[in-house]
Image (tube, rainbow, N blue to C red):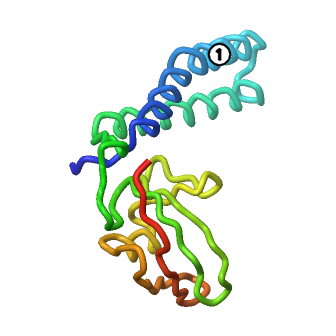
Amino acid sequence: MDKIPMTPGGHVALSEEYRRRTSEDRPTIIAAISEARAHGDLSENAEYHAAKEQQSLNEGRIKELEALLALADIIDVSKLSGSTVKFGATVKLVDEDTEKETSYQIVGDAEADLTKRRISISSPIARALIGKEAGESVEVAAPGGARTYEILEVKFV
């Protein structure tokens, strides 16, 4: 499998989630299953079925985190430089139709979070920006129609 690009901060966050799920959540869920089992008939025990479902979801996420962390290619953004957009860049854009300015950091799929202005390197807007420089315009095919942005600034923080 291919390596998954990730910032150091993203790796730390995933590692912390893995630690929490394995050392805190897992024992709590096991205790809940044991307590529900003690209540008797499992076929009609809603607490037992809910705890088993929670266990299944938690174990699935643990497996997912193990795979992500094993394939992580940690890229220290602070050591990157240049004027072209690439992984780790923080890009300041202006929508050429609305004149609204915004900025995004381009990160790996596992750490993308639009509320924190972090977009996945595989997203349509990031794919359109890769390799471009400040001053260039890019057209992004979005679900609501094509949008045109001008790149105002490219920096690596």
Please name the residue that numbered disc 1 is placed on. Answer: 28
Name which residue type carries label 1: Thr
Q: Position of residue 95 (x, y in %)?
A: 59, 81
At x 57%, y 89%, the residue is: 145
Q: Position of residue 84 (x, y in %)?
A: 32, 67
Secondary structure beneath dot 1 equals helix
Q: Position of residue 134 (x, y in %)?
A: 41, 74
Above or below 151: residue 86: above
Mark 1 closeness class: few <14, some 14–19, many ≥20 residues within 10 Å: some
Q: Is residue 79 visible?
A: yes
Above or below 71: residue 86: below
Front residue of 117 and 112: 117
Above or below 33: residue 86: below
At x 69%, y 30%, the residue is: 49
At x 54%, y 24%, the residue is: 21
At x 39%, y 61%, the residue is: 121
Total numbered labels: 1
Instruction: Answer with left or right where residue 131 lies relative to residue 103.
Output: left
